[in-house]
């Protein structure tokens, strides 16, 4: 049988036999089989059965300009035809990487002037931690090693990135994580960590958990605070506006560097170009990925302040760190074209001014749903937290997998709607229309109703 002749079942058999999927329970996958995607256009993906799915998740929070943009295909093809690969280890550079580095720094505060490229968000976080170590060693404070991250954080799947992550099953999986220099504090998750408080007072309280931990460890031992502007995979945890100014005040007070992971928030998710623009953050190190290329090719960037880069450049000698695909020409060319599309089509501006308020208003209509205890959003990222008892905020038992059940109900009806624990998350492409958002929310409600019925 040729590939063209294979039907869905034949693909599923091959998939099961050979393809180990990320973050997947393979025993369960063996029973259900995979959905086999074949084509994408705009906010839609089609599968081998001809079913059209509206992608409420932008893939994994990356397909910001939507699927099937011919300009991005052309940018990759043109670059590959001209210069398909270029290493940048041995005093060699190329135009796409240089142009992109300059472009990124022009979009950020004056203090952020240097860019290191990798392929993934996880690798960007590895780079950031190696930079932190190098920086504190070079300035004569090698004991500043501890990194304070947050519960429910997700920073990727390599050893260090999984350690920074505060999603505990990721630690149990290896048995030896988190690595000893990482510690986690509570997160600005008001529904669970400050219910009923005035939100701005809660933001100050949540920031004080950083100061408490710094004092416990001793400021002389703390390298950095590490966080997403708003937590995506943790379940759409959006801090009050008082949180970040207070975090930054505390960081400055104790000389603790600030690393901001914008892998999901960057390139418009909050309705501003970066989460830092939304919350007013000036990081020492910042990572972007995903939306940098809208997921068309793998690329991430670690953007580094003068404070850190100057030390590395002037005192560091050779920095023994790099990846074969650092600054890959085709990925950089696609990123530049993607940024051009976002800018020229006013996609980020429209997401902030038009779509985000509509999205928020629609999401908030779910507050009275019998399963929904909390509704959270920033820009085009939203979460609906499922609870067993709205009065007591009691959650369903983990084994019930109610969120996964709701995802499956949504998929049956043509919507990709993700469960982060018991929080149902939405992060649609930034090019979605208000009519398409209506469909997203209609299906989300049907899926929740069916879930309520099943568990009721
Ligand atoms: N940082 C954040 C905030 C993420 O959400 C992710 C992935 O979802 C990563 C880092 C890791 O990125 P990657 O999967 O490209 O390694």
Image (tube, rainbow, N blue to C red):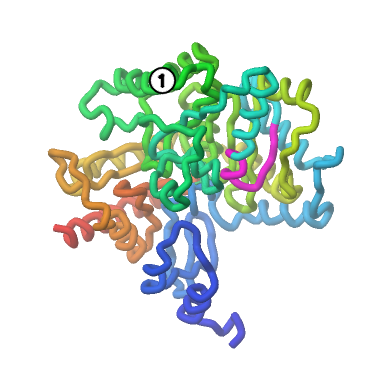
Q: Residue at x 43, y 65 (%)?
A: 52
Residue extending farthest to the right is: 91
The crowding category of the residue bearing disc 1, from other C-alpha atoms within 10 Å (few below 14, some 14 to 19, many at least 20), is few
Q: Residue at x 53, y 42 (%)?
A: 161
Residue 357: image x %, image y %?
A: 37, 35
- Residue closer to the observer: 65 or 316: 316
Q: Answer with the quarter of the image where residue 381 lies.
A: top left
Q: Magenta stretch: residue 124 in it?
A: yes
- Residue closer to the observer: 392 or 430: 392
- Residue closer to the observer: 157 or 440: 157
Q: Answer with the quarter of the image where residue 389 lies.
A: top left
Q: Assign the N terminus to one quadrant of the image.
A: bottom right
| Residue 144 appears in view | yes
The magenta stretch spans which residues? 115-125
Residue 393: image x %, image y %?
A: 18, 40
Q: Answer with the quarter of the image where residue 141 lies.
A: top right
Residue 314: image x %, image y %?
A: 78, 21
Q: Residue at x 50, y 81 (%)?
A: 10
Callout 1 secondary element = helix
Q: Is residue 252 above or below residue 30?
A: above
Q: Residue at x 27, y 53 (%)?
A: 398
Q: Assign the C terminus to one quadrant of the image.
A: bottom left
- The residue that disc 1 covers is 216
Q: Is residue 183 above or below residue 310?
A: below
Q: Give the total number of marks visible in the rendering.
A: 1
Q: Is residue 317 left or right of residue 349?
A: right
| Residue 433 appears in view | no
Q: Magenta stretch: residue 87 in it?
A: no
On whether ligand 1 comes within 8 Å of the CB at mark 1, the answer is no
């Amino acid at each position: 049988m040729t590939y063209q002749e294979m039907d869905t079942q034949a693909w599923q058999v091959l998939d099961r036999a050979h393809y180990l999927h990320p973050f997947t329970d393979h025993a369960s996958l063996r029973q259900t089989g995979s959905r086999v995607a074949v084509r994408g256009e705009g906010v839609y993906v089609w599968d081998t059965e001809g079913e059209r799915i509206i992608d409420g998740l932008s893939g994994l929070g990356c397909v910001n300009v939507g699927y099937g943009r011919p300009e991005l295909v052309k940018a990759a093809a043109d670059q590959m035809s001209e210069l398909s690969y270029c290493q940048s280890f041995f005093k060699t550079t190329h135009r796409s990487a240089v142009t992109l580095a300059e472009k990124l720094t022009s979009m950020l505060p004056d203090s952020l002037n240097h860019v290191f490229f990798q392929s993934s968000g996880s690798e960007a976080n590895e780079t950031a931690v190696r930079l932190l170590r190098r920086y504190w060693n070079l300035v004569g404070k090698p004991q500043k090693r501890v990194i304070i991250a947050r519960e429910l954080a997700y920073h990727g799947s390599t050893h260090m990135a999984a350690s920074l992550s505060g999603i505990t099953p990721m630690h149990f999986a290896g048995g030896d994580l988190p690595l000893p220099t990482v510690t986690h504090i509570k997160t600005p998750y008001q529904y669970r960590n400050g219910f009923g408080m005035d939100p701005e007072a809660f933001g100050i309280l949540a920031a004080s958990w950083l100061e408490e931990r710094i004092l416990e460890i001793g400021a002389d031992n703390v390298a950095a605070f590490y966080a997403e502007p708003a937590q995506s995979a943790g379940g759409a945890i959006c801090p009050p506006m008082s949180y970040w100014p207070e975090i930054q005040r505390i960081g400055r007070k104790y000389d603790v560097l600030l690393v901001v992971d914008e892998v999901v928030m960057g390139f418009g998710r909050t309705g501003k170009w970066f989460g830092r623009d939304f919350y007013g953050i000036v990081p020492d190190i910042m990572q972007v990925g995903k939306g940098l290329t809208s997921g068309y090719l793998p690329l991430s960037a670690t953007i580094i302040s003068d404070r850190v880069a100057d030390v590395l450049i002037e005192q560091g000698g050779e920095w023994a760190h790099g990846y074969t695909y650092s600054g890959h020409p085709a990925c950089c060319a696609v990123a530049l074209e993607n940024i051009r599309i976002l800018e020229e089509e006013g996609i980020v501006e429209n997401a902030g001014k038009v779509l985000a308020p509509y999205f928020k208003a629609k999401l908030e209509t779910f507050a009275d749903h019998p399963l929904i205890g909390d509704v959270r959003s920033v820009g085009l990222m939203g979460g609906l937290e499922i609870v067993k008892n709205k009065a007591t905020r009691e959650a369903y038992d983990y084994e019930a997998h109610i969120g996964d059940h709701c995802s499956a109900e949504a998929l049956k009806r043509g919507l990709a709607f993700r469960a982060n624990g018991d929080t149902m998350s939405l992060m649609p492409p930034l090019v979605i229309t208000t009519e398409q958002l209506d469909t997203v929310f209609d299906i989300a409600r049907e899926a929740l109703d069916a879930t309520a019925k099943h568990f009721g």
